[in-house]
Image (spheres, coloured by chain):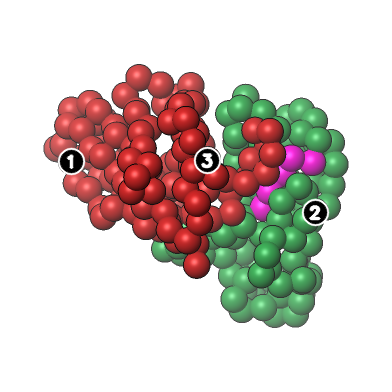
Amino acid sequence: DIQMTQSPASLSASLGETVTIECRASEDIYSNLAWYQQKPGNSPQLLIYDANSLADGVPSRFSGSGSGTQYSLKINSLQSEDVASYFCQQYNNYPYTFGAGTKLELK
Amino acid sequence: QIQLVQSGPELKKPGESVKISCKASGYTFTDYAMHWVKQVPGKGLKWMGWINTYTGKPTYADDFKGRFVFSLEASASTANLQISNLKNEDTANVFCARSVGGALYWYFDFWGPGTMVTVSS
């Protein structure tokens, strides 16, 4: 199975700040990577697919980048509604696997 | 609009069975595969497998072979997950999720709200 190592596990940032979350795959996943946002009590919502494509309706302050085994999610100008957990997911190989998540809080 | 509506929470005893449903609306059900994802409360996400909504063929992740069955009621645009011989470690929120992408490289663009399954004696 492909292991997805996500960091940091938690993050505290101020409104307006830029934050970056990293995800490292245990092998090359050829940009077959998605990022999801999950707010407490809700289901995950797709943010980014194919490593850097923004999903429909997602604000442009979210962006994804990376290739090979290293990927990142950047949130520019942090808003209060961005407080959530974030997960990466690889879909290059079965079984699809997720990172352990990053919990983003406001400072 | 696209919606996935799941059945309500379940409280079961070890050894019992449970069936969770996921009713899709707002799109052609058979055009998109349906996946199942497990989340232990406060923890991460684990992919359980998927079902081809056109052929009905299920594919299970290794950890979900044996006691887990994916099925369809295609005429009702509904996917089902049945878990038999429930164990305490099956306690989790279970999501259905529609997949998009191509050639088995799928990500999940719509998710159901989740069905909480609690297994306790």
Q: Are marks 3 and 1 in contact (CB under 8 Å)?
A: no
Secondary structure of the residue carrying tag 2 is: loop
Which chain does the residue under circle 2 lie in? Answer: A
With respect to residue A80, does A49 lie above or below? above
Q: Residues within 10 Å of mark 2 (few under 14, many from 20)?
A: many
- Chain ID for red: B
Where's residue B106, x and y in %? 64, 40
Residue at which label 1 appears: B12
Side (left or right) of A48 relative to A40? right
The residue depicted at 40 percent of the width and 21 percent of the height is B65
Horizontal and vertical percent for residue A56?
68, 65
Left or right of B116, for residue B34: right
Q: Where in the figure is residue A14, as x and y percent of width and height?
A: 70, 77
Residue A86 position in % (x across, y down): 61, 56
Kind of element beneath mark 1: strand
The Cα–Cα distance between marks 3 and 2, rounded to whole angstroms, is 23 Å
Per the rendered image, the range of residues in magenta is: A31-35
Nearest-to-viewer mark from 3 and 2: 3
The residue identified by callout 2 is A52
Provide the major secondary structure of the magenta segment.
strand
Type of amino acid under label 2: Asn
| Observer-nearest of B77 and A16 | B77
Q: Colour of chain A?
A: green
Marks 3 and 1 on same chain: yes
Task: Using a 10 Å C-alpha cutoff, classify the residue at mark 3 as few (fewer than 14 neighbours), some (14 to 19) or many (20 or more).
Answer: many
**Outermost residue, front direction?**
B75
- Tag 1: residue type? Lys
Q: Disc 1: which chain?
A: B
What's the residue at 58%, 29% (across, down)? A95
Pointer 3 residue: B33
SS label for mark 3: loop
Q: Amino acid at mark 3?
A: Ala
